[in-house]
Image (tube, helix red, strand yellow):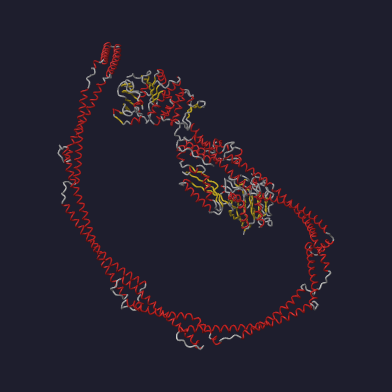
Amino acid sequence: MAIVRFVHAADLHLDSPFRGLREVEPAIGAELREATFVAYDKIIDLCLAEKVDALLVAGDIYDARDRSLRAQLRFRDGLQRLADAGIRSFVCHGNHDPLDGWEAQIDMPEGCQRFGSEVEAVPLDPNEPDAVVVYGVSFPQQDVYENLARRFQRDARHLYAIGLLHANVGSDSGHAPYAPCTVEDLERSGMDYWALGHVHTRRVLREHDPVVVYPGNPQGRHRRESGARGVALVDIGNDRQAQVQFRDVDVVRWETIVLNIAELSGEQQLLEGLDERLDGIATADRHAVVVVRLVGRGALHYPLRRGDTAEDLRARLNDSLRGRDPFVWCAAVEVETAPPFDRAERRQAQDFLADILRLVDEIQAEETPPAWLREPLASLYEQGKPRRYLGQDPVSDAELLQLVDRAEERCVEALLAAEDGSGATERSAP
Amino acid sequence: MKLRHLHLTGFGHFGDVDLPADGADLSGRLTVIHGPNEAGKSTLLEFIRTMLFGFPVRERDRRFPPLAGGRHGGRLHVLDDEERAYVIERFAGRGSGTLTVSAERGRRVDPATLQRMLGHASALLFKNVFAFDLDQLRDVTALQEAGVTDSIYSAGVGAAGLTQALAQFDASCLKIYRPNGRKQPVAQVLAGLASVEEKLAASAAAAGQYGKLRAERETAERALAKADAARTRAQHESVRAVRLHDAWSDWVTLREVERELERIAPRPEFPSDATTRLENAEASLAEVSARFERERTELARCRSAAAAIKFDAALLETAAEIETLRRKRDSFTTALDELPAGRAERQSLEQEVAQDVGALGRAWNADRVERFDTSAPVRKELAEVGAAYNGALQSQRDAEIACASADRRLRDESARLDAVREALHEIPDPILDAETLGARRAAVNRLRDELVSLDAARTLRDQEHARLGELQTQRPEAQPLPFWQRTEWIGAGATAAVGTLALAGGVLAGGTGLIFGLVAAGLLAATAIFLALRARKAPVPLAWKQFDKAIRAQKERAEAAAQAVQAIEARLPERAAEAALGEAASESDVAEAKEGLDAAQKVLDMRLEHEGDLRAVERQVRLAQQDVERARTAAKEADASAEAARRAWILWLDSRELAETMQPDEVTELFGRLDTVRAKLRQLADRRRRLAAIEHDVEEFCGLAEPLLEQRGEARYQTPAQLGPAVDALIAAFDASREAKEEKERLAAQVKVARRRLADVTAEQKHAEEALQHLLASAGVDDPVEYRRLAAQQARRAELEPQARECIAGLVRRSGPGQAFEEFRATLEASDLDSLQRNRQRTADRLADQEERRDRLIARLGELQQQLTTLEHDISAAELRQDREALQTELAAQAREWATLTLAKALLEQARRRYEEERQPEVVRRAEEYFGRITGGRYPRLNAPLDQQQIEIIQADGDRKTPAELSRGTQEQLYLSLRFGLIEEFASHSARLPVIVDDILVNFDPERAERAAGALRQLARSNQVLVFTCHPSTVDLFQRVAPEVETLPLPDRG
């Protein structure tokens, strides 16, 4: 017997685009644009099928700066379906959809509780004000660096308290440091269950006293959001223990195929290897967007680097995948291979190439990359327009070091080609 | 390597010249060799190069022929780097000349030792780097010729592609992105992004209107509700006006009908179809009367026809028998036709079967034929046993044939063996065995070769002796002067004598006299030794010396030829003994022995061949005997098998009760014949059964027909053939009686029906008369004419009443029932057509106004709804956002590629900077040190840029210069420094070769010349340095800078 059963969702990001796709077939593009909506519809279906008491949404329902009317209407429609079935909904807003963000004047259905900029405690069942109570607060504006968790204080009369909050717990470096707090802050609030949002990967930070859960986002939108995505279906038993089950609702799944060319004898074997891996993905019951990463040292490096080979390979893979249902789309073929030579041994030589290798090793060993590396990049990255799209801090130290590795490969190729007398190899277009 | 002493046997104008002249060593590491112009510095330089690396291969390149006589070439006395002494002697000859390398005590060593001592340096390297003059120092190409540019210009450090790579990276970067560029991918992507952003801004602005549009829609919806109400009201008024107007004609008609109806009194007893009813009653009565007449006539006709029909009732009672006869009539005829042929066929078959059974033999009858089993299993059994029997008989026959064949072959092979043995007896025995014969032939051949060699050696010995005689007779008579006749010896002797006297005088004088005497005696003794040495070295006349030398050589050759003859002669007895010949065996003896050996070889070969044939035939005989034995054994086995098969066959025949003499083929044929007879027996039985059935049918038909015919009174028939037509007549009579009876029964039934119908028509006629009377009575008249007049009046009223109702219905349809109708009618009564038309127009106009207003509101509402729907379902913004992401992804990829290339360029440049600062080639580093020293620190650094064939000179202030920008002297100092660097670098890993420079300081200012001399002094610590100069000042300079320097005047010309 359960006190309450609810679905905990977060970071719906309705109507936000998929990233990292340079081009896509029109039909697949339409599916991708609908993906966040379909995943949301599946959340509503799950609530109805599981006959939950409430749906909790912990912020970032949509991206306010996109001003997507469609996102807000579809969100309202879903909640209306729940209201029609007598299921309540509790919503707080995060950094992407703060209270001062753009919002169309849409009436939310009855039974939907939207939290404001102050922490409120709202009983899940109005007829039982001291039973299960949802505490929640929304971001008044995007940049909230205050520890909002500290504002939550449980009323001792309440049987079971759920905290609904969009926050970065434990200063996750992969996400913006909004509403930063620690697990201890959450513990001190006295909540029984923390329904969190903001971190897009599902995780249970604490299993009891209190239970702290990030359900992750229901639909991955770029390669870093790979793997299964969904929501948490939570049962609170009479013993006040929470049973948390993650349920997948994603429509399109991001997958990465890593293939080492060192073990491949030729292009035919490469294609066969890719086909085999893609077939494995294609048997899944969801659409898939795939990024192929070719790594390792081998003789295949040279043909792969030549001209538009990577882009041709991607087109060829997509041709072979065309017509599948569920679809599989190759978003990118990343050639991160290296020429087949023994770097460690070559580094011992006393020639110019070895100087380059030793120089790169020195750069990699330094705490911060030297200024002379960053300076030549300014002519692009510090320019107004490119900077706007490439980000305020477009090249982090880690990325710069990755680029140095790639640059080393280019130097090695050019110098080896000159040694062979074959001339420098034409570079592949990005 | 270090040069100790030079001896020029003949080279240029030097002939038999030593350096140093007194036979001493060039003991110092730094030596200045000086002499005036044309003293032979260049000749000496070339002599040293030639001794070490050989003469030019082509004759025309040999620039220093022995002008002063002597053999073209000379000797070098050298020490290698381990201080071991060697003498290198080289004279002109084929190729690079005749080279001899000798170690201590004249021991010759491998000429390759010289290469090792030279550190495998090439002649060009030595010429351009180690032994050069001023012209070569200035020659920029000299170092390239020497193949040392790689050592100087960083070649081989793997930077060959540096410049190309930098250019390529730069070009690739610019292809992707160029500041202020428009065509590059980055610029195009940014332009695309700007466009998308613009559209997205427009889309966002439109979305911002959503709330306003919704409010406007609500206002419009309220206004529309009001307009709807007003329109409804106007619509009602307009409809009523239209209806009143439209009802006017109905209203006028209604008024007229109502007035006419008032004039006709209603008679409810008259139905609406009164006239029709009267006419119908009158017509019905007439029709019934006509039918009564027709029925009465028909009844009379039927009665008379029935009375006329007659038939045979007795015959009809035999209907079952008649029908049986009819059914079997055709088969009876057929049976009568078939009977004779069937009986004949049966008789023929019976005879045939009897013959076939008789043909099988007395042991056979029809019964045995039927019983005898020839089924498939028995046939299979017959085939197996018969085949085994036949097969065994065939094998027996084959074995007999094989036996006969083997016997025949054995006889043939035995005859061949006898013939071969006889032939072998006729061949004589060989003299020698094969091994001895072979050894003897080899020994004879060797003896023959020795005899030929002896002949040739004797000829050569005689020729050499003759040549020696010639030389001895041609030798000139000139003789050298006795030593006492030569002035040098006289001078030396006189000086020695004076010295002796001086010494004796000193001894006698004592004191200072003794000292003076000793000094004088020393000086005179030295002079005497000098003169004696000179006399000893004075040349002997050339022709005389050459002849002596030639005679000595010819003597050696003659002696060698004589020794060769003796050696062969000493070997001959042994060779003759090996060939089994006498010691004095001649070439003819050898030829004769060879012939004898050839004949013996022929006999031996023939005997060996026949012995081989004999062995082969013997083997064939043995094989034939084995074949005979095998064949006989096989024949016996075949006989046994045949007997067993025969017994099995007879047993099988007995089991079938067949004769033991029968063969399998005969039994097979018997089986076939039995099958044929059995088939005929079955055919005969079948034929008999069919004939009996036909005869039975004929008898049965006759038995049925005859009693009936007798019953009809017809006579008995003799044959069945006569019975057929009588039966046919009987059946025809039966059919006629049956038809007559049936017709009579049908007419009787028709009479009954006609009688009943006549009764019915009579009743109908009465009923029709009563109906007509009743109709007239119901209208209160007894006359059909009056009835018709009243009926017409009521018919008119019936027409008017529906008209009135129709008009009222039309009005009600427009007004509605009840009170509304009354009001509507009252309004019509109070109106006229004109007023109604005006009212209709007025209300229609008002309605149109309301409609128009409402339409406007609906249109606006539709617009608003469409805008809202568009906004709600607009996916263009989503598409634009997706486009923006795609463009940003593209931009990031392009930027990443650009950054990679830019960083690659930066890496190359940084590595190059570091290389140039820290890892200049060793040669440049050493040269840099010398050049800085010579130029007094003005040019402290040299730089060999990567991937370039040039040297940069870096001044103290950091400015860089190319060699071409230096003064002539400084250029020479630079190239000198580079050579010093090369020399040291060569010494560090290979050999320390002597350095020989020929007046290279002439263009240096005094300071730099002095520093250059100091540099040479420094170089001399590792390598021997010889400085050739014609300038006494240079000698002085070196003596000043390097006190340990040795100076040596150039030797006199020969």
Q: Nearer the viewer, residue B1017 or B639?
A: B639
Up the image or down, B313 lies above or below B790; here it is: below
Up the image or down, B362 lies above or below A88; here it is: below
Q: Position of residue B645 (x, y in %)?
A: 29, 69
Q: Position of residue B566 (x, y in %)?
A: 19, 33
Q: Nearer the viewer, residue B172 or B330?
A: B330
> Would residue A339 be seen by someone viewing this image from the given angle?
yes
Tell me which corner region of the image, top left, top right, bottom left or bottom right, holds residue B76.
top left
Tell me which corner region of the image, top left, top right, bottom left or bottom right, holds residue A342.
top left
Q: Nearer the viewer, residue A197 or B92?
A: B92
Q: Position of residue B367 (x, y in %)?
A: 35, 79
Which quarter of the image is occupied by the C terminus of chain A?
Answer: top right
Q: Is residue B148 left or right of residue B189?
A: left
Q: Is residue A396 left or right of residue B677?
A: right
Up the image or down, B271 lies above or below A7; here it is: below
Q: Is residue A169 left or right of residue B419?
A: right
> Would residue A21 be seen by someone viewing this image from the given angle?
no
Which quarter of the image is occupied by the N terminus of chain A?
Answer: bottom right
